[in-house]
Image (cartoon, rainbow, N blue to C red):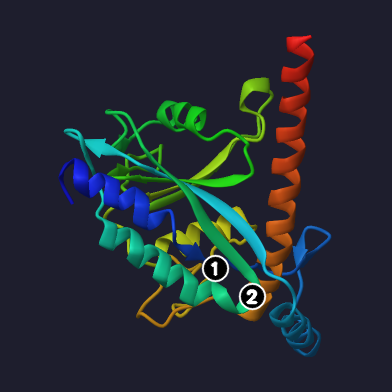
Amino acid sequence: MRGRAASTTLGLLIGALMWLVAPAAARAGGGRQVPDLRRDTARLAEHRGAAQLRLKVTLHVATAEGDPVMSRAAAQAWVHRANEALAPFGLSVEVVSVVRMPAGWSEVTRWQARRALADYAPPDGTIHVFAIDSLDDGRRARKIRGLHWRYRGLTRSLRGREYLVVTTAAPSTTLAHEIGHMLGLRHATRTDNIMCSCRRSYGVGFNGAQGLAMREGARRFLARQGAVGYAALRSRDRTRR
């Protein structure tokens, strides 16, 4: 997609899309638990009948030579594939804003750039997703296709900052994979699971235990986003007095 008209179309069409999201794996006392399939099946049935937990998304699209690095069709493919994998677990994601990034962000190759990218991801209650051309692992300059970044340090201005990055060369399952990480999932080892880096075929998905865990992860995400956002609002109000 090239040109101003195509960029406008990207914003209009993506902003109207609904994305469904899912949950993760059970843990207790810092370790892993074997899922109780009877209990989990019952809980999944409850979630299917329960109200959807809706997570809002801000999509940031990098530019190269003034044009977006990704096409509308590619963005739709990410959304469609994520919906297929995440829909069964009572979660939804809605793209509420599409933002064109300034020049210079088509590649993220250093840890300093990852931290600087957080300036564009305020704790506003949305999942910030950055679509870029190239990303490395920050250690051996090994190219990777997706990333979940979350700040855990003491710098006040960065508290609550977290975001996802997906490259234009990534498979259509990568967005769902990174959402899984954001909602608490670790990597899996089965090739039919979206959380496996070795995943194969179009039919990969999440399992029931992952779905339940991500639903809890979605609640935690909304809680920490709300808490940080409220604190920032209170601080701004005090400054204005």
Left or right of 71, for residue 82:
right
- Residue at 40%, 43% in the rendered image: 137
Residue 96 against residue 28 in the figure, above or below: above
Does the CB distance between marks 1 and 2 fall below 8 Å? Answer: no
Q: Residue furthest right?
A: 29
Residue 24 in sight here: yes
**Mark 2 lies on residue:** 89
Label 1 vs label 2: CA separation?
Answer: 9 Å
- Residue at 45%, 31% in the rendered image: 117
Mark 1, secondary structure of its residue: loop
Left or right of 186, for residue 230:
right
Residue 146 against residue 85 in the figure, above or below: above
What x and y, as percent, mark residue 39?
A: 81, 85
Quadrant including the C terminus: top right
- What's the mark number on residue 44? none
- Residue at 61%, 27% in the rendered image: 158
User: Which amino acid does the dot numbered 1 rest on?
Assistant: Leu
Left or right of 161, for residue 97:
left
**Mark 1 lies on residue:** 20
What x and y, as percent, mark residue 136?
A: 35, 42
Q: Quadrant of the rendered structure where residue 142 is?
A: top left
